[in-house]
Image: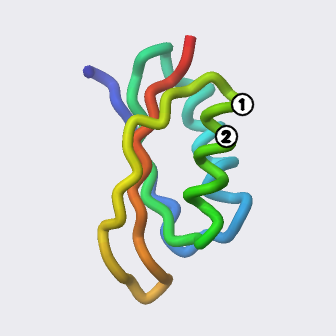
Amino acid sequence: MDGDVTLDCSGLKCPMPVLRAAKALRSMAAGQVLTVTATDKAAPKDFQTFCAEGGHDLIATDVLGDTPHGTLVRFIIRRGG
């Protein structure tokens, strides 16, 4: 989809990855896709809860590998209506 956004939150601790994602999503249109990468251990649960409560679709959660900041995880989120 045209206008999709990528956000790198590697090295940021909870709650910063979710807060930055929320800010990015506010400027996006419904249906656009946000890809976030994060290394915070709490991020998988945080993004699951954030999407469920915010009406966004968590399309995928993929473990990409280890980095100096921790395990890098990619979250693909479709902005809700």
Whether 47 is drawn above or below 72: the answer is above
> How far across and down, in percent of the image, does residue 22 sit?
64, 38
User: Residue 12 appears at what percent x and percent y?
Assistant: 61, 69
Res. 50 mark: 2
Residue that appears at 40% across and 51% down: 61
For the residues bearing labels 1 and 2, Cβ distance under 8 angstroms: yes
* Image quarter of the N terminus: top left
Numbered label tally: 2
Tell me the crowding category of disc 2: few under 14, some 14 to 19, or many 20 or more residues within 10 angstroms, Cα based: some
Residue on which disc 1 sits: 53
Rendering colour mode? rainbow
Decide which of 6, 75 is in the foreground and name it.
75
Residue 53 visible in the snapshot: yes
Position of 18 with respect to 5 (left or right) is: right
Identified at 30% across, 67% down, the residue is 64
Q: Is residue 47 left or right of residue 37?
A: right
> As drawn, is 63 to the left or to the right of 53?
left
Image quarter for residue 21? top right
Q: Residue at x 49, y 14 (%)?
A: 30
